[in-house]
Image: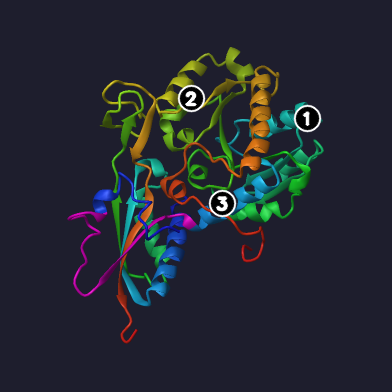
Amino acid sequence: MHELAVCQGLMNQVEQIARRENAECVTRILLSVGPLSGVEAQLLIDAFPIAAAGTIAQGAELTIEEQPVRVKCLSCDAESDARPNRLLCGSCGDFRTRLISGDEMMLMSLELERRENA
Amino acid sequence: MCDTCGCNVTEGNRHLIEGDGKLAQTESGKEAISVLQGLLSENDRLAAHNREHFDRHGVLALNLMSSPGSGKTRLLEETIAALAGELRIAVVEGDLETENDAQRIRDRGVQAVQITTGTACHLDAHMVHKALHQIDLDTIDILFIENVGNLVCPASFDLGQHRNITLLSVTEGDDKPAKYPVMFRAADLMLVSKSDLLAVLDDFAPNKAERHLRELASTAPVFTLSAKSGDGMASWFDWLHAQHDAIAERVASGETVRPAVQPDGQLLHAHNHDHEHSHDGHD
Protein backbone atom coordinates (compact mmCIF):
# COMPACT_ATOMS: atom_id res chain seq x y z
CA MET A 1 0.00 0.00 0.00
CA HIS A 2 2.35 2.71 -1.17
CA GLU A 3 -0.47 4.50 -2.98
CA LEU A 4 -0.97 6.86 -0.03
CA ALA A 5 2.70 7.87 -0.25
CA VAL A 6 2.31 8.36 -4.00
CA CYS A 7 -0.83 10.44 -3.39
CA GLN A 8 0.95 12.61 -0.82
CA GLY A 9 3.73 13.26 -3.35
CA LEU A 10 1.05 14.16 -5.86
CA MET A 11 -0.51 16.67 -3.45
CA ASN A 12 2.86 18.42 -3.02
CA GLN A 13 3.15 18.75 -6.78
CA VAL A 14 -0.42 19.98 -7.13
CA GLU A 15 0.01 22.58 -4.38
CA GLN A 16 3.21 23.88 -5.97
CA ILE A 17 1.55 24.26 -9.35
CA ALA A 18 -1.58 25.81 -7.86
CA ARG A 19 0.53 28.42 -6.05
CA ARG A 20 2.48 29.18 -9.19
CA GLU A 21 -0.76 29.61 -11.14
CA ASN A 22 -2.35 31.70 -8.41
CA ALA A 23 -5.23 29.25 -8.18
CA GLU A 24 -8.04 29.53 -5.68
CA CYS A 25 -8.87 25.87 -5.90
CA VAL A 26 -8.09 22.80 -7.94
CA THR A 27 -11.22 21.18 -9.34
CA ARG A 28 -9.88 18.27 -11.34
CA ILE A 29 -6.68 16.25 -11.51
CA LEU A 30 -5.94 13.98 -14.45
CA LEU A 31 -3.42 11.18 -14.09
CA SER A 32 -2.13 8.66 -16.56
CA VAL A 33 -1.31 5.28 -14.98
CA GLY A 34 -0.23 2.00 -16.52
CA PRO A 35 -0.33 -1.41 -14.81
CA LEU A 36 3.47 -1.72 -14.91
CA SER A 37 3.95 1.48 -12.89
CA GLY A 38 3.31 -0.50 -9.72
CA VAL A 39 0.43 1.66 -8.53
CA GLU A 40 -3.19 0.57 -8.55
CA ALA A 41 -5.63 3.14 -9.92
CA GLN A 42 -8.40 2.13 -7.52
CA LEU A 43 -6.08 2.39 -4.50
CA LEU A 44 -5.02 5.87 -5.63
CA ILE A 45 -8.66 6.87 -5.85
CA ASP A 46 -9.24 5.48 -2.34
CA ALA A 47 -6.18 7.25 -0.92
CA PHE A 48 -6.89 10.57 -2.65
CA PRO A 49 -9.49 12.04 -0.24
CA ILE A 50 -7.15 11.34 2.70
CA ALA A 51 -4.17 13.00 1.02
CA ALA A 52 -6.24 15.90 -0.33
CA ALA A 53 -7.97 16.76 2.96
CA GLY A 54 -7.12 20.31 3.98
CA THR A 55 -5.24 21.07 0.75
CA ILE A 56 -6.15 23.31 -2.15
CA ALA A 57 -7.36 20.20 -3.96
CA GLN A 58 -9.84 19.10 -1.31
CA GLY A 59 -12.98 18.04 -3.13
CA ALA A 60 -11.27 17.89 -6.52
CA GLU A 61 -12.23 15.18 -8.95
CA LEU A 62 -9.46 12.66 -9.55
CA THR A 63 -9.58 11.11 -13.00
CA ILE A 64 -7.23 8.31 -13.94
CA GLU A 65 -6.59 7.34 -17.54
CA GLU A 66 -5.45 3.73 -17.42
CA GLN A 67 -2.95 2.98 -20.15
CA PRO A 68 -2.73 -0.26 -22.10
CA VAL A 69 0.38 -2.43 -22.06
CA ARG A 70 2.00 -2.20 -25.53
CA VAL A 71 5.36 -3.42 -26.71
CA LYS A 72 7.51 -2.85 -29.78
CA CYS A 73 9.58 -5.81 -30.92
CA LEU A 74 13.31 -5.18 -31.20
CA SER A 75 13.61 -8.04 -33.63
CA CYS A 76 10.68 -7.69 -36.10
CA ASP A 77 9.64 -4.11 -35.27
CA ALA A 78 5.96 -5.02 -34.81
CA GLU A 79 3.91 -3.23 -32.17
CA SER A 80 1.43 -5.29 -30.21
CA ASP A 81 -0.70 -5.46 -27.07
CA ALA A 82 0.78 -7.45 -24.21
CA ARG A 83 -0.04 -8.56 -20.69
CA PRO A 84 1.85 -7.12 -17.71
CA ASN A 85 3.57 -10.46 -17.05
CA ARG A 86 3.98 -11.52 -20.67
CA LEU A 87 5.71 -8.78 -22.63
CA LEU A 88 6.44 -10.89 -25.69
CA CYS A 89 6.07 -9.73 -29.28
CA GLY A 90 2.52 -10.55 -30.40
CA SER A 91 3.76 -11.08 -33.93
CA CYS A 92 6.95 -13.16 -33.76
CA GLY A 93 6.99 -14.12 -30.05
CA ASP A 94 10.47 -12.74 -29.34
CA PHE A 95 11.07 -11.67 -25.72
CA ARG A 96 13.33 -8.80 -26.71
CA THR A 97 10.77 -6.03 -26.77
CA ARG A 98 10.60 -2.45 -25.62
CA LEU A 99 7.65 -1.23 -23.59
CA ILE A 100 5.98 1.66 -25.41
CA SER A 101 3.01 2.04 -23.06
CA GLY A 102 1.93 0.66 -19.71
CA ASP A 103 4.40 1.96 -17.09
CA GLU A 104 3.11 5.52 -16.92
CA MET A 105 2.65 7.21 -13.56
CA MET A 106 2.14 10.78 -14.68
CA LEU A 107 0.33 13.90 -13.58
CA MET A 108 -1.10 15.00 -16.91
CA SER A 109 -3.10 18.12 -16.12
CA LEU A 110 -4.93 20.14 -13.53
CA GLU A 111 -8.11 22.09 -13.84
CA LEU A 112 -8.26 25.06 -11.55
CA GLU A 113 -10.07 28.24 -10.72
CA ARG A 114 -7.96 31.36 -10.46
CA ARG A 115 -8.34 34.05 -7.85
CA GLU A 116 -10.24 37.16 -8.86
CA ASN A 117 -8.08 40.24 -9.52
CA ALA A 118 -5.02 38.06 -9.80
CA MET B 1 11.18 19.59 -14.60
CA CYS B 2 10.26 19.61 -18.17
CA ASP B 3 6.65 20.64 -18.42
CA THR B 4 7.08 23.01 -21.29
CA CYS B 5 9.05 21.49 -24.14
CA GLY B 6 7.00 18.33 -24.42
CA CYS B 7 9.93 15.92 -24.20
CA ASN B 8 7.99 13.80 -21.74
CA VAL B 9 5.13 13.18 -24.11
CA THR B 10 5.33 9.47 -24.89
CA GLU B 11 3.66 7.18 -27.33
CA GLY B 12 1.40 6.13 -24.49
CA ASN B 13 0.09 9.55 -23.58
CA ARG B 14 0.43 11.62 -26.74
CA HIS B 15 -3.19 11.07 -27.74
CA LEU B 16 -4.30 12.86 -24.59
CA ILE B 17 -2.95 16.21 -25.64
CA GLU B 18 -3.42 16.10 -29.39
CA GLY B 19 -6.51 16.72 -31.49
CA ASP B 20 -9.60 15.88 -29.52
CA GLY B 21 -7.64 14.41 -26.61
CA LYS B 22 -8.89 15.03 -23.10
CA LEU B 23 -6.23 17.58 -22.35
CA ALA B 24 -6.58 19.54 -25.54
CA GLN B 25 -9.89 20.95 -24.41
CA THR B 26 -10.70 23.31 -21.64
CA GLU B 27 -14.02 23.28 -19.89
CA SER B 28 -15.66 26.65 -19.82
CA GLY B 29 -15.11 28.73 -16.71
CA LYS B 30 -12.14 26.71 -15.57
CA GLU B 31 -8.61 26.60 -16.70
CA ALA B 32 -6.79 23.43 -17.61
CA ILE B 33 -3.07 23.42 -16.95
CA SER B 34 -1.01 20.82 -18.74
CA VAL B 35 1.60 19.39 -16.37
CA LEU B 36 3.09 16.10 -17.61
CA GLN B 37 5.22 15.30 -14.56
CA GLY B 38 6.01 11.95 -13.05
CA LEU B 39 3.90 11.39 -9.93
CA LEU B 40 7.03 10.89 -7.88
CA SER B 41 8.97 13.85 -9.23
CA GLU B 42 9.98 15.05 -5.76
CA ASN B 43 11.32 11.59 -4.89
CA ASP B 44 13.01 11.40 -8.29
CA ARG B 45 14.70 14.75 -7.76
CA LEU B 46 16.20 13.56 -4.48
CA ALA B 47 17.13 10.22 -6.04
CA ALA B 48 19.04 12.02 -8.79
CA HIS B 49 20.77 14.00 -6.09
CA ASN B 50 21.76 10.80 -4.26
CA ARG B 51 23.03 9.29 -7.52
CA GLU B 52 25.15 12.33 -8.20
CA HIS B 53 26.54 12.04 -4.69
CA PHE B 54 27.50 8.38 -5.32
CA ASP B 55 29.07 9.22 -8.68
CA ARG B 56 31.11 12.02 -7.20
CA HIS B 57 32.62 9.61 -4.68
CA GLY B 58 33.03 6.77 -7.18
CA VAL B 59 30.70 4.56 -5.15
CA LEU B 60 28.59 1.86 -6.79
CA ALA B 61 25.09 1.91 -5.26
CA LEU B 62 23.07 -1.29 -5.42
CA ASN B 63 19.44 -1.71 -4.38
CA LEU B 64 18.68 -5.19 -3.06
CA MET B 65 15.02 -6.20 -3.21
CA SER B 66 13.09 -9.40 -2.47
CA SER B 67 10.42 -10.96 -0.28
CA PRO B 68 11.15 -11.06 3.45
CA GLY B 69 13.32 -14.04 4.29
CA SER B 70 14.91 -14.65 0.90
CA GLY B 71 18.42 -14.25 2.32
CA LYS B 72 19.42 -10.67 1.52
CA THR B 73 21.26 -10.09 4.79
CA ARG B 74 22.94 -13.51 4.71
CA LEU B 75 24.11 -12.83 1.16
CA LEU B 76 25.60 -9.52 2.31
CA GLU B 77 27.33 -11.11 5.30
CA GLU B 78 29.06 -13.69 3.10
CA THR B 79 29.83 -11.11 0.40
CA ILE B 80 31.50 -8.80 2.92
CA ALA B 81 33.62 -11.66 4.23
CA ALA B 82 34.61 -12.93 0.78
CA LEU B 83 35.48 -9.52 -0.68
CA ALA B 84 37.43 -8.23 2.33
CA GLY B 85 40.61 -6.59 1.03
CA GLU B 86 39.15 -6.33 -2.51
CA LEU B 87 36.08 -4.10 -2.30
CA ARG B 88 35.14 -1.88 0.63
CA ILE B 89 31.45 -2.20 1.46
CA ALA B 90 28.87 -0.32 3.51
CA VAL B 91 25.22 -1.17 3.95
CA VAL B 92 21.98 0.72 4.45
CA GLU B 93 19.38 -1.59 5.99
CA GLY B 94 15.67 -0.99 5.61
CA ASP B 95 13.19 -2.69 7.93
CA LEU B 96 9.95 -1.75 9.60
CA GLU B 97 11.50 -2.25 13.02
CA THR B 98 14.71 -3.33 14.82
CA GLU B 99 18.43 -2.73 14.38
CA ASN B 100 19.03 -6.48 14.01
CA ASP B 101 20.15 -6.53 10.39
CA ALA B 102 22.45 -3.52 10.73
CA GLN B 103 23.99 -5.17 13.79
CA ARG B 104 24.62 -8.38 11.83
CA ILE B 105 26.44 -6.34 9.19
CA ARG B 106 28.43 -4.33 11.77
CA ASP B 107 29.53 -7.62 13.33
CA ARG B 108 31.32 -8.21 10.02
CA GLY B 109 33.30 -5.02 10.59
CA VAL B 110 31.70 -2.69 8.08
CA GLN B 111 29.60 0.47 8.35
CA ALA B 112 25.85 -0.13 8.49
CA VAL B 113 23.01 2.30 8.96
CA GLN B 114 19.58 1.01 9.90
CA ILE B 115 16.53 2.80 8.58
CA THR B 116 13.40 1.79 10.46
CA THR B 117 10.42 2.79 8.38
CA GLY B 118 7.75 2.21 11.05
CA THR B 119 4.84 1.20 8.88
CA ALA B 120 6.19 2.25 5.48
CA CYS B 121 6.53 -0.69 3.13
CA HIS B 122 9.46 0.68 1.09
CA LEU B 123 12.49 2.96 1.27
CA ASP B 124 12.37 6.27 -0.57
CA ALA B 125 15.08 8.64 -1.76
CA HIS B 126 14.63 10.92 1.24
CA MET B 127 15.24 8.14 3.79
CA VAL B 128 18.35 7.02 1.92
CA HIS B 129 19.59 10.59 1.70
CA LYS B 130 19.34 10.97 5.46
CA ALA B 131 21.16 7.67 6.00
CA LEU B 132 23.98 8.86 3.72
CA HIS B 133 24.85 11.53 6.28
CA GLN B 134 26.09 8.73 8.51
CA ILE B 135 28.28 7.01 5.92
CA ASP B 136 31.71 8.12 4.81
CA LEU B 137 31.47 7.52 1.07
CA ASP B 138 35.17 8.27 0.58
CA THR B 139 36.07 5.08 2.42
CA ILE B 140 33.89 2.65 0.46
CA ASP B 141 33.58 1.17 -3.04
CA ILE B 142 30.07 -0.32 -2.90
CA LEU B 143 26.99 0.77 -0.98
CA PHE B 144 24.32 -1.89 -0.67
CA ILE B 145 20.85 -0.62 0.08
CA GLU B 146 18.88 -3.54 1.48
CA ASN B 147 15.29 -2.53 0.83
CA VAL B 148 12.31 -3.52 2.95
CA GLY B 149 11.38 -7.13 2.23
CA ASN B 150 8.44 -6.66 -0.13
CA LEU B 151 7.93 -7.58 -3.79
CA VAL B 152 5.52 -4.73 -4.50
CA CYS B 153 6.21 -1.22 -3.26
CA PRO B 154 10.03 -0.87 -3.39
CA ALA B 155 9.96 -1.24 -7.18
CA SER B 156 8.22 2.11 -7.59
CA PHE B 157 10.70 4.33 -5.73
CA ASP B 158 14.04 5.39 -7.20
CA LEU B 159 16.63 5.74 -4.44
CA GLY B 160 19.52 6.92 -6.59
CA GLN B 161 20.94 3.43 -7.04
CA HIS B 162 22.87 2.40 -10.14
CA ARG B 163 21.52 -1.13 -10.30
CA ASN B 164 18.62 -3.18 -8.94
CA ILE B 165 19.21 -6.71 -7.74
CA THR B 166 16.20 -8.91 -7.03
CA LEU B 167 16.52 -12.11 -5.02
CA LEU B 168 14.20 -15.06 -5.48
CA SER B 169 14.81 -17.86 -2.99
CA VAL B 170 14.08 -21.45 -3.95
CA THR B 171 11.68 -21.67 -1.00
CA GLU B 172 9.34 -19.42 -3.01
CA GLY B 173 7.54 -20.36 -6.21
CA ASP B 174 9.51 -20.25 -9.46
CA ASP B 175 6.60 -18.28 -10.96
CA LYS B 176 7.22 -15.23 -8.75
CA PRO B 177 8.39 -13.12 -11.73
CA ALA B 178 5.01 -13.75 -13.39
CA LYS B 179 3.16 -12.83 -10.21
CA TYR B 180 5.17 -9.66 -9.46
CA PRO B 181 6.07 -8.34 -12.91
CA VAL B 182 6.77 -4.76 -11.80
CA MET B 183 9.41 -5.90 -9.32
CA PHE B 184 11.14 -8.47 -11.50
CA ARG B 185 11.03 -6.27 -14.58
CA ALA B 186 13.05 -3.72 -12.57
CA ALA B 187 15.86 -6.22 -11.88
CA ASP B 188 19.23 -5.67 -13.55
CA LEU B 189 20.31 -8.95 -11.99
CA MET B 190 18.21 -11.77 -10.58
CA LEU B 191 19.72 -14.02 -7.93
CA VAL B 192 18.09 -17.39 -7.26
CA SER B 193 19.14 -17.79 -3.63
CA LYS B 194 19.35 -20.68 -1.13
CA SER B 195 20.26 -23.13 -3.90
CA ASP B 196 21.56 -25.55 -1.25
CA LEU B 197 17.87 -26.30 -0.55
CA LEU B 198 17.15 -27.34 -4.16
CA ALA B 199 18.00 -30.92 -3.20
CA VAL B 200 14.98 -31.06 -0.91
CA LEU B 201 12.72 -28.59 -2.76
CA ASP B 202 12.43 -30.31 -6.09
CA ASP B 203 9.40 -28.31 -7.18
CA PHE B 204 11.47 -25.18 -7.78
CA ALA B 205 13.10 -25.13 -11.21
CA PRO B 206 15.65 -22.31 -11.70
CA ASN B 207 15.22 -22.52 -15.48
CA LYS B 208 11.46 -21.94 -15.08
CA ALA B 209 12.14 -18.89 -12.92
CA GLU B 210 14.42 -17.60 -15.66
CA ARG B 211 11.81 -18.29 -18.33
CA HIS B 212 9.23 -16.26 -16.38
CA LEU B 213 11.78 -13.44 -16.14
CA ARG B 214 12.39 -13.51 -19.91
CA GLU B 215 8.65 -13.22 -20.48
CA LEU B 216 8.93 -9.77 -18.89
CA ALA B 217 11.24 -8.82 -21.79
CA SER B 218 14.17 -8.88 -19.37
CA THR B 219 17.68 -9.66 -20.54
CA ALA B 220 19.08 -9.46 -16.98
CA PRO B 221 21.58 -12.15 -16.01
CA VAL B 222 20.41 -14.83 -13.58
CA PHE B 223 22.75 -16.50 -11.09
CA THR B 224 21.74 -19.43 -8.92
CA LEU B 225 23.69 -19.41 -5.68
CA SER B 226 23.86 -20.28 -2.03
CA ALA B 227 25.45 -17.89 0.45
CA LYS B 228 25.45 -20.75 2.93
CA SER B 229 27.32 -23.37 0.87
CA GLY B 230 29.20 -20.89 -1.33
CA ASP B 231 27.93 -22.54 -4.53
CA GLY B 232 27.57 -20.09 -7.41
CA MET B 233 28.95 -17.16 -5.42
CA ALA B 234 31.90 -16.66 -7.80
CA SER B 235 29.66 -15.34 -10.61
CA TRP B 236 28.10 -12.88 -8.18
CA PHE B 237 31.50 -11.62 -7.05
CA ASP B 238 32.65 -11.28 -10.67
CA TRP B 239 29.52 -9.28 -11.46
CA LEU B 240 30.20 -6.94 -8.51
CA HIS B 241 33.81 -6.43 -9.61
CA ALA B 242 32.73 -5.71 -13.19
CA GLN B 243 30.09 -3.21 -12.08
CA HIS B 244 32.55 -1.51 -9.78
CA ASP B 245 35.30 -1.37 -12.41
CA ALA B 246 32.87 0.36 -14.75
CA ILE B 247 32.54 3.23 -12.28
CA ALA B 248 35.94 4.81 -12.81
CA GLU B 249 35.22 4.89 -16.54
CA ARG B 250 31.84 6.49 -15.97
CA VAL B 251 33.15 9.12 -13.60
CA ALA B 252 35.88 10.01 -16.10
CA SER B 253 33.32 10.53 -18.86
CA GLY B 254 30.92 12.41 -16.58
CA GLU B 255 28.11 9.96 -17.17
CA THR B 256 25.96 8.07 -14.76
CA VAL B 257 24.01 4.87 -15.04
CA ARG B 258 20.55 3.96 -13.89
CA PRO B 259 18.72 0.71 -13.54
CA ALA B 260 17.68 -0.51 -16.99
CA VAL B 261 14.00 -0.15 -16.22
CA GLN B 262 12.60 2.83 -14.39
CA PRO B 263 9.07 4.05 -13.97
CA ASP B 264 8.02 6.37 -16.74
CA GLY B 265 8.27 9.59 -14.78
CA GLN B 266 11.79 8.89 -13.64
CA LEU B 267 12.99 7.99 -17.09
CA LEU B 268 11.60 11.18 -18.49
CA HIS B 269 13.07 13.44 -15.90
CA ALA B 270 16.78 13.07 -16.52
CA HIS B 271 18.41 15.54 -14.22
CA ASN B 272 21.30 17.75 -14.93
CA HIS B 273 23.05 18.26 -11.66
CA ASP B 274 25.57 20.97 -12.31
CA HIS B 275 25.46 22.33 -8.80
CA GLU B 276 27.89 21.48 -6.06
CA HIS B 277 26.63 18.92 -3.62
CA SER B 278 25.03 20.44 -0.59
CA HIS B 279 22.79 19.03 2.07
CA ASP B 280 20.88 22.24 2.50
CA GLY B 281 17.18 21.98 2.21
CA HIS B 282 16.94 18.23 2.06
CA ASP B 283 16.29 17.44 5.65
Which residue has dot 1 on it? Answer: B86
Confirm whether residue B170 shows in the render. no
Q: Chain of mark 2?
A: B
Residue B205 percent location from the top left of the image: 50, 16
- The amino acid type found where label 2 is placed reads Gly
Q: Which residues are magenta?
A: B17-41
Which residue has dot 2 on it? Answer: B173
> Sequence-wise, which precedes: disc 2 or disc 1?
1
A118 versus B227 height, above or below: below
Taking the spot 72% from the left edge, 48% from the top edge, the residue there is B113
Q: Chain of mark 3?
A: B
What is the spatial separation of the Cα atoms under label 2 and label 3, in whole angstroms?
Answer: 34 Å
- The amino acid type found where label 1 is placed reads Glu
Tell me the number on the disc at residue B48.
3
Give the foreground label among 2 and 1. 1
In the shown orientation, is residue B2 left or right of residue B164?
Answer: left
Majority secondary structure of the magenta segment? Answer: loop
Confirm whether residue B155 shows in the render. yes
